[in-house]
Amino acid sequence: MEYRRMGSTGLQLSVLSFGSWVTFARQTDDEDNDRLMSIAYDAGVNFFDNAEVYSAGKSEEMMGRILKKKGWDRTSYVLSSKAFFGWKGEQKKPNQHGLSRKHLVEACHEALTRMQTDYLDLYYCHRPDPNVPMEEIVRTMNTLIQQGKILYWGTSEWSAAEIVEAHMVAKDLGLEGPAVEQPEYNLFNRQKMEADYLPIFRNIGMGTTIWSPLASGLLTGKYNNGIPEGSRLSLEGYEWLKEKVLMEEKIAKVIKLADLAQELGVSLPSLAIAWCISNPNVTTAILGATKESQLTENLKALEVLPLLTAEVLAKIDEIMGTKPQITIS
Ligand code: NDP
């Protein structure tokens, strides 16, 4: 396993990590996810990602139970949660979501209880919240740090301008700005990581824990001939995701990418994940997997990484046609 420092912090994250979105919702007992987390941990994964909204709090509870059962040294792994969406679905009341001090603090307390831990290593604002003053968010996150309930705070899917604003407010107050952002990053979605955030990487320093490295599975080739039964895009309640992910023009690119993977003698998922971590601004790519075989395959991305020469990367850019224009020098 390779470990990377999270932006300008001293924290080291395994370059491949493991997340529980969708996956944990599908298992009613802990056994399958226990096995997946164990495979990851044994391979050197040291970061497990979670959020209040995943399975309406049940994902945090399940991860907490598994971690307790495993008995791994708490100092050997990094645990996260995120607040914004709330976990009460349509029933949520005004202060049960968003980034107000009230919700951030209450969601943190709930995460600590559900995950049976004294502190979260990383605590994210899961989305921006224009209804809350930036100063309230920055002060709240810093209070949680000072109380020892979280170690670093971060953002997820914030724009570059919002992240810079948070840093400016924090600097004015003599407080800590966000240390890490959690954006979507994969071969179909490159704009933020490769263009928008560049000045932040350069001038402030920021770690990234990127999500959906396989575009929800599309980049495995599993959707090339329709939607397999039991796959994520076949699930009830994820129709919105199907609309976002599944498009003919994308599948045509995946088919060409599969040819390149074959030429290189590697699997398509391992190539797509290796491509993500070939970007040095990625601290870690969060893997999602419903089966042990998927996780084992995806961890092979580490072996594929050295094969990604400038020539191979150029071929990938040509196939995908998704490389953003970079306007700053
Ligand atoms: P991916 O894009 O890698 O999708 C993972 C899914 O693809 C798996 O659950 C599985 O779904 C399928 N898959 C994975 N590997 C293979 C394989 N080798 N062969 C075939 N199918 C495979 O990642 P996720 O979208 O799951 O995101 C990863 C993590 O990122 C989440 O768990 C979460 O922690 C975080 N996240 C954060 C978000 C945010 O807003 N901050 C948003 C979304 C995710 P199946 O078997 O069901 O088809």
Image (cartoon, rainbow, N blue to C red):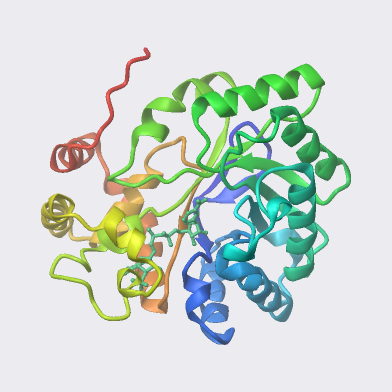
Q: Position of residue 116 (x, y in %)?
A: 78, 70
Location of residue 120 with respect to 232 vertically, above or below: above
Residue shown at 75% from the left, 30% from the top: 176
Q: Residue furthest top?
A: 329
How many numbered dots are placed on residues in this image? 0
Query: Along the horizontal axis of the image, is 230 left or right of 166?
Result: left
Q: Using residue 296 as the reference point, say whether residue 120 is left or right of it.
A: right
87 left or right, relative to 235: right
Q: Is residue 210 above or below residue 203?
A: below
Q: Closest to the observer: 288 or 272?
A: 288
Q: Residue at x 56, y 38 (%)?
A: 207
Percent of width and height locating residue 208 = 52, 41
**Quarter holding the C terminus?**
top left
| The image quarter in which residue 237 lies | bottom left
Return the residue nearer the eye: 16 or 308. Answer: 16
Task: Tell me what residue is drawn at x 79 percent, y 55 percent.
Answer: 106
From the viewer's perspective, tell me whether residue 273 is left or right of residue 175: left
x, y percentage for residue 117? 79, 65
Identify the residue at the far right of this view: 147
226 or 130: nearer the viewer: 130
Residue 232, horizontal then vertical, whole percent:
35, 70
Q: What residue sits 69% from the left and 51% below the top?
A: 94
Q: Where 59 sits versus 183, above or below? A: below
Q: Quadrant of ligand 1?
A: bottom left
164 and 307: which is toward the camera: 164
